[in-house]
Amino acid sequence: MSNWGYSSSNGPETWAESYPTAAGPRQSPVDIKAVNFEVMKKLDWKYNPKNTIDICNTGYGWKVHVDGKGSELIGGPLQGKYILEQYHCHWGATSEKGSEHTVDGISYAAELHFVHWNAEKYQSFEEAAQQPDGLCVLGVFLKSGRQHDEVEKIVSYLSNIEYKSEHKKINEAIDPNQMLPQNSSYWTYLGSLTTPPCSECVIWIVFKEPIEVSEKQLEAFRSLKSYCCEEGCPCDDFSGFVKTNFRPTLPLGQRQIKECPNC
């Protein structure tokens, strides 16, 4: 069994025991409220939907791997070009809360993370993840509402990755562009990975506008299992299901949150 997770025995409040960086000054997520109104530059991005590789069950949720060639994220707070490595999602047991970031203390049902790395300065994702400007993650809030057609493509694969470590090749185009909000206004701050080792290497860009997904789609996320098929069901808080996989917010400290209000 992993030495970290989201249950009472190995949840976020215990992570710093094995991963000291988790107690650092630049941790994520945070509650977004104290905004510095310095106007940031607009973001620009491009993705190739055909470069989707596969989807896997990490034991903590689903993750889609992509071939980053041809992708590009520039502008905003970024210096240079970042390329897409993977995207994944965090959610809660109900749609009352599940997002990692909150806005004035208010949670959303879930939060998509599009993970990019600085390909202009570093040679690999692994190298970039050790640097303070190595990664950029786009955060997109999900709220319960209408079915989202592009997210439904991901949902259609979840029955193939029911158990931890299972993966399935994706033979169709899945377009990240369709999972970003139409309004590209955002908040940005310096933070960390929200899962161990919680490395303080992330420039966060969190979009203000959420996208809608259906309750049925959220329930499909919660149907994933946190253990391998050959293992017995763990006697944890969630009976072996990935019901909750979000880290609670942490102090902003001396950091500033900036915004691009009318992008």
Image (tube, helix red, strand yellow):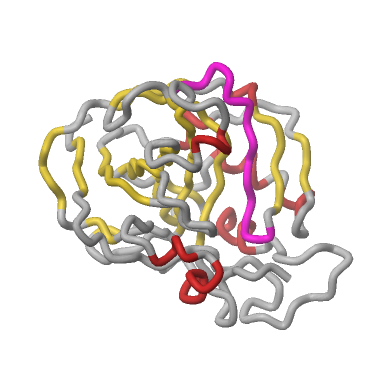
User: Quick check: is 61 in the magenta stretch?
Assistant: yes
Extreme-left residue of the structure:
37
Q: Which residue is drawn at 48% across and 47% down?
A: 112
**Residues in magenta, as a range:** 59-72
Side of 211 relative to 94 (left or right): left
Q: Which of 157 and 119 is in front in this view?
A: 119
Q: In this view, does 179 lie above or below 99?
A: above
Side of 143 relative to 176 (left or right): left
Q: Nearer the viewer, residue 191 or 87?
A: 191
Numbered-mark total? 0
Q: Is residue 8 above or below residue 51?
A: below
Percent of width and height locating residue 21 = 44, 61
For the C terminus, which image quadrant?
Answer: top left
Side of 103 relative to 262 (left or right): right
Q: Which residue is drawn at 72% across and 44% down?
A: 157
Side of 251 relative to 175 (left or right): left
Extreme-top residue of the structure:
70
Q: Which residue is drawn at 61% across and 30% down?
A: 174
Percent of width and height locating residue 166 = 79, 51
Extreme-right residue of the structure:
230
- The image quarter containing residue 41 is top left
For the N terminus, which image quadrant?
Answer: bottom right
Percent of width and height locating residue 116 = 48, 34
Q: In this view, does 193 lie above or below 119?
A: below
User: Quick check: is 49 in the magenta stretch?
Assistant: no
